[in-house]
């Protein structure tokens, strides 16, 4: 069996096209098996992770938004991202942050900095759009490696890229989109 933990660890040494090819290589490894009772969700772990129910809930939302989802294992002693999402042949790594508190997004975003440059915020509580916009903007300003914050809120999906968050009127535009 291929050593998926070693392949995931290699991501920390790669950039650009090499990084993207490695993400796809990991997803295509033989370590993933279909999650019983689910469509387009695959796992390389046993489902015994402490946060597996949060991972599975977010994976289901991702499938609704057109992604094929690979749940990554969480080898002990290594900070690894949670998912690989694939859509239209594009593979991306995401770190899941489930937002349950009314002002916890900032801390959760900053906690993701060493795991992935793409973060998924799964909003399971009402959250002030203006506050969230300011926190996302701050996250991009403090983390020069961050590329995207993907937000699942109810049935909507918002992808916030660095260039959008750096626009002068980002907070206003974000609040409009988030409030839909």
Image (tube, rainbow, N blue to C red):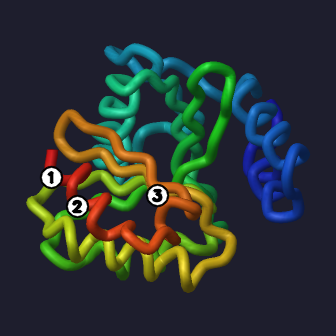
- Residue at image position (75%, 40%) is 23
Find numbered disc 1 in the image and state the secondary structure of the residue it sits on. Answer: loop
On-image quarter of the C terminus: top left
Looking at the picture, does residue 57 appear above or below residue 94?
A: above
Q: Position of residue 154 (x, y in %)?
A: 17, 40
Q: Are marks 2 and 3 in contact (CB under 8 Å)?
A: no
N-term-proximal mark, 1 vs 3: 3
Residue identifier under label 1: 179
Q: Position of residue 75 (x, y in %)?
A: 62, 57
Find numbered disc 3 in the image and state the secondary structure of the residue it sits on. Answer: strand
Residue 103 visible here:
yes
Looking at the picture, does residue 28 appear above or below residue 37?
A: below
Residue identifier under label 2: 175
- Taking depth in this image into account, of 167 and 39 the one nearest to the observer is 167
N-term-proximal mark, 2 vs 3: 3
* Disc 2 to disc 1, C-alpha distance: 6 Å
Residue 119 visible here:
no
Q: Are marks 2 and 1 in contact (CB under 8 Å)?
A: yes
Q: Is residue 78 left or right of residue 122?
A: right
Counting labels gives 3
* Disc 2 to disc 3, C-alpha distance: 15 Å
Find numbered disc 2 in the image and state the secondary structure of the residue it sits on. Answer: helix
Tell me the crowding category of disc 2: few under 14, some 14 to 19, or many 20 or more residues within 10 angstroms, Cα based. some
- Residue at image position (74%, 24%) is 28
Residue identifier under label 3: 149
């Amino acid at each position: 069996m291929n050593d998926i933990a070693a392949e995931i660890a290699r991501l920390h040494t790669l950039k650009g096209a090499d990084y993207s090819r490695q993400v796809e290589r990991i997803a295509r490894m033989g370590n993933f098996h279909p999650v019983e009772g689910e469509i387009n969700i695959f796992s390389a772990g046993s489902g015994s992770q402490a946060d597996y129910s949060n991972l599975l809930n977010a994976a289901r939302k991702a499938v609704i938004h057109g992604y094929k989802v690979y749940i990554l294992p969480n080898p002990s002693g290594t900070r690894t991202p949670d998912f690989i999402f694939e859509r239209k042949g594009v593979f991306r790594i995401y770190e899941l942050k489930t937002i349950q508190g009314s002002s916890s997004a900032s801390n959760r975003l900053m906690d993701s900095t060493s795991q992935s440059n793409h973060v998924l915020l799964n909003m399971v509580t009402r959250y002030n759009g203006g506050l969230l916009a300011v926190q996302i903007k701050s996250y991009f300003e403090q983390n020069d490696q961050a590329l995207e914050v993907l937000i699942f809120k109810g049935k909507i999906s918002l992808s916030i890229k660095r260039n959008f968050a750096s626009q002068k009127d980002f907070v206003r535009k974000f609040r409009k989109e988030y409030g839909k």
